[in-house]
Image (tube, grey):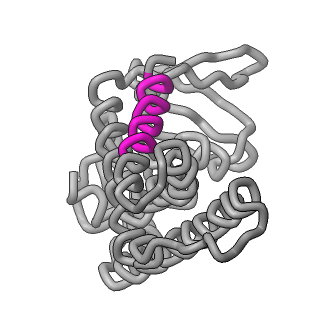
C-alpha cells in the first residue's frame, strides 16, 4: 500500500510540475493542470513498455522498438492535447474559434517527447528504488496437492513444467505441484523471472550463467534451449 501511495504521489507531482511549465504558454493554472493531464496516459504507457523493450538482446530491434513506442505515445499525446484544447473552446469561448490558438510549443514533437521521457524516466527510477528499498510483495497464493500455499515471489527459485502440471521450487528446499501452465506463471511473475526453456522459468536474481547453454540455480544445472539462448545470455550477463 505504501508503494502505491508513493507512486500516485509521484504522478500527481509530475502533473503539477508539468502544469507550471505550461503556464508559461499563456494558460492559467487551472487550464494548465487540465492540459498536463493530456500527458499522463502516454507517460504511463511509456514507463510500462520501455522496461520490457530493455530486455530485447538485439540492439537494432531494441532501438526500433523504442522509436516506435516513443512515436506512438507522442501521437497519443498530440491527440489528447487537441481534445483538451477543443474542450477549452467549448467551455470557455462557446465555440468562438477566433480565440483558439494552440501554443507552438505544444505542436513541437521534440518538446512533447521530452516531457513524456522525463515523466516516464522519473517513474522508472522511482519504481527501481522502491523495489530495492521495499522488496517484499504480497505473497502469491496457489493450490498444491489440494492445499492452499502462499509464497513470496522472491522465495521462488525456478518453475519446471512437467506434462500437465508445473513444479515450483522454493528457496527453502520445498517443492510444490500446481496445474497452472508455465506461460501463466511467466505472466504472473513478470520481468524478475526469465524463460530459458519451454519447460523452465527461473528467478533472474539467483540464476548464474555457467556455460553457453546452461545456468546454475539452487544447486541445480538447467539447460538453456536454442530459442531462448540469445535473450538469456544477454540478460544474465548484464546482471
Q: Position of residue 175 (x, y in %)?
A: 54, 26
In the figure, is residue 59 to the left or right of 140? Answer: left
Whether 90 is among the magenta residues is no
Q: Is residue 109 above or below residue 77?
A: below
Q: Is residue 84 above or below residue 14?
A: below
Q: Position of residue 137 (x, y in %)?
A: 47, 23
Read off the magenta span: 3-17
Whether 15 is among the magenta residues is yes
> Where, by quadrant of the figure, is residue 94 drawn?
bottom right
Residue 120 visible to the viewer: no
In the figure, is residue 41 to the left or right of 47? Answer: right
Q: Residue at x 53, y 73 (%)?
A: 102
Q: Residue at x 56, y 60 (%)?
A: 198
Q: Residue at x 47, y 44 (%)?
A: 29
Q: Is residue 53 above or below residue 180?
A: below
Q: Nearer the viewer, residue 168 or 21?
A: 21
Q: Nearer the viewer, residue 216 or 99?
A: 99
In the figure, is residue 140 to the left or right of 137? Answer: right
Residue 14 visible to the viewer: yes
Q: Is residue 29 above or below residue 176?
A: below
Please, what is the dominant secondary structure of the magenta stretch? helix
Q: Nearer the viewer, residue 67 or 24?
A: 24
> Where, by quadrant of the figure, is residue 147 drawn?
top right
Q: Residue at x 33, y 53 (%)?
A: 121
Amino acid at each position: 500500500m505504501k508503494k502505491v501511495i508513493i507512486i500516485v504521489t509521484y504522478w500527481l507531482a509530475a502533473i503539477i510540475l508539468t502544469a507550471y511549465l505550461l503556464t508559461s504558454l499563456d494558460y492559467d493554472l487551472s487550464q494548465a493542470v487540465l492540459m498536463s493531464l493530456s500527458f499522463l496516459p502516454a507517460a504511463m504507457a511509456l514507463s510500462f513498455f520501455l522496461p520490457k523493450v530493455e530486455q530485447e538482446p538485439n540492439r537494432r530491434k531494441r532501438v526500433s522498438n523504442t522509436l516506435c513506442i516513443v512515436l506512438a505515445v507522442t501521437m497519443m499525446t498530440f491527440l489528447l492535447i487537441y481534445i483538451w484544447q477543443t474542450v477549452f473552446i467549448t467551455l470557455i469561448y462557446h465555440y468562438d474559434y477566433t480565440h483558439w490558438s494552440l501554443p507552438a510549443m505544444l505542436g513541437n514533437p521534440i518538446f512533447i517527447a521530452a516531457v513524456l521521457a522525463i515523466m516516464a524516466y522519473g517513474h522508472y527510477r522511482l519504481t527501481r528504488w522502491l523495489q530495492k528499498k521495499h522488496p517484499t510483495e504480497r505473497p502469491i497464493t496457489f493450490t498444491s496437492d489440494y492445499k492452499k500455499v502462499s509464497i513470496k515471489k522472491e522465495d521462488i527459485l525456478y518453475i519446471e513444467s512437467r506434462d500437465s502440471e508445473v513444479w515450483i521450487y522454493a528457496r527453502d528446499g520445498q517443492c510444490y505441484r500446481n496445474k497452472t501452465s508455465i506461460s501463466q506463471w511467466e505472466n504472473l511473475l513478470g520481468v524478475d523471472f526469465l524463460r530459458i526453456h519451454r519447460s523452465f522459468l527461473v528467478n533472474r536474481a539467483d540464476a548464474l550463467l555457467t556455460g553457453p547453454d546452461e545456468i546454475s540455480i539452487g544447486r541445480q544445472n538447467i539447460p538453456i534451449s536454442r530459442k531462448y539462448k540469445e535473450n538469456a545470455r544477454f540478460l544474465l550477463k548484464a546482471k
